[in-house]
């Protein structure tokens, strides 16, 4: 299907896992996609794979960016606009899950998670929102987590960052009412990616990255007046 033909999307954290799957699904719907992350060689692999699957019908651009550095995020959006025009869809997916209990005392790990998972999301929104507001259209997708709905003793700081992502999504929904710009928060349960060394979760089979990508496509293909605010996806 080509429900996103002519649209431009940026997907952060597109060098692996959920981000790579989101980029692929958006491209299969006809969107031109900018892939962003720190590992350029991995981005190029994803770019080549999508270009082949899409038979060259969409434009895929790989841009190296550290989402925890605001100037990188601003440059990412500027380069994306220069290459592919106005950004219609911005997927805040880049994220890290490091040692997260308070008792571990791993301050550097906490700071990494805060910098990417919270500040990176804010930098991304800050970079794309003015253009979206001036055009009265656009869609921001924030990838949070079920860890933003419940906390375990090993996930304290990671959960705190994902609660923050949900709070940002909830506040933004109110800020953006009647502007034409949409915001969707997606909270995945356990997904089989590099982020997870577990292969089951509470004896449940883990989700595939493509399952989350399909939730993104669902949200961005609704009619313009429909804002899907929150999607939570857990394995059965
Ligand atoms: N897997 C799960 O069970 C699960 C569940 C709920 C939510 N999530 C969320 O889903 C998102 C994607 O995670 P994943 O499971 O797909 O893990 P992943 O395969 O490890 O992917 C993480 C992505 O984030 C990028 N990234 C990390 N730090 C970055 C930085 N400073 N600047 C730019 N990019 C950065 C990585 O790229 P580079 O290393 O190349 O920079 C990579 O592409 C995260 O926000 C995660 O919290 C995952």
Image (cartoon, grey):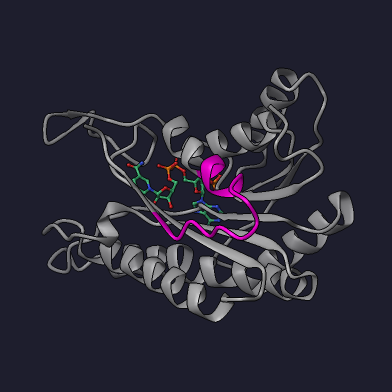
Q: Is residue 71 visible?
A: no
* x then y, percent, for residue 107: 29, 70
Q: Residue furthest bottom?
A: 175
Seen at 81% across and 36% down, the residue is 59
Front-most of residues 142 and 107:
142
Lateral position of residue 14 relative to residue 115, left or right: right
Which quarter of the picture shows residue 47? top right
Lateral position of residue 108 relative to residue 141, left or right: left
Q: Which quadrant does the C terminus fall into? A: top left
* Total number of numbered discs in the rendering: 0
Seen at 58% across and 42% down, the residue is 14
**Magenta span dominant secondary structure:** loop
Lateral position of residue 212 relative to residue 161, left or right: right
Q: Is residue 139 visible?
A: yes
Question: Is 166 placed above or below 221 here?
Answer: below
Q: Which residues are magenta?
A: 216-230
Q: Which quadrant does the N terminus fall into? A: top right
Lateral position of residue 102 relative to residue 91, left or right: left
227 drawn magenta = yes
Which quarter of the picture shows residue 155? bottom left
* x then y, percent, for residue 221: 61, 44
Which quarter of the picture shows residue 61? top right
Seen at 26% across and 56% down, the residue is 147
């Amino acid at each position: 299907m080509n429900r996103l033909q002519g649209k431009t999307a940026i997907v952060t954290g597109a060098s692996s896992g959920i981000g790579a799957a989101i980029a692929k699904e958006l491209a299969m719907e006809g969107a031109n996609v900018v892939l962003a992350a720190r590992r350029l060689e991995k981005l190029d692999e994803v770019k080549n794979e999508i270009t082949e699957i899409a038979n060259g019908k969409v434009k895929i651009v790989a841009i190296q960016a550290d989402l925890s550095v605001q100037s990188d995020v601003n440059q990412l959006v500027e380069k994306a606009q220069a290459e592919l025009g106005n950004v219609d869809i911005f997927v805040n997916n880049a994220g890290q899950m490091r040692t997260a209990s308070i008792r571990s005392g791993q301050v550097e790990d906490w700071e990494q998670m805060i910098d990417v998972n919270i500040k990176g999301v804010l930098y991304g929104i800050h970079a794309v929102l003015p253009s979206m507001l001036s055009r009265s259209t656009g869609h921001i997708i924030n990838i949070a987590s079920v860890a933003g709905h419940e906390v375990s003793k090993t996930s304290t700081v990671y959960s705190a960052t994902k609660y923050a992502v949900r709070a940002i999504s909830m506040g933004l929904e109110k800020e953006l009412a009647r502007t034409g710009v949409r915001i969707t928060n997606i909270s995945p349960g356990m997904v089989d990616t590099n982020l997870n060394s577990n292969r089951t979760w509470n004896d449940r089979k883990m989700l595939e990255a493509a399952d989350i990508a399909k939730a993104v496509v669902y949200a961005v293909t609704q009619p313009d007046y429909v804002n899907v605010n929150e999607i939570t996806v857990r394995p059965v």
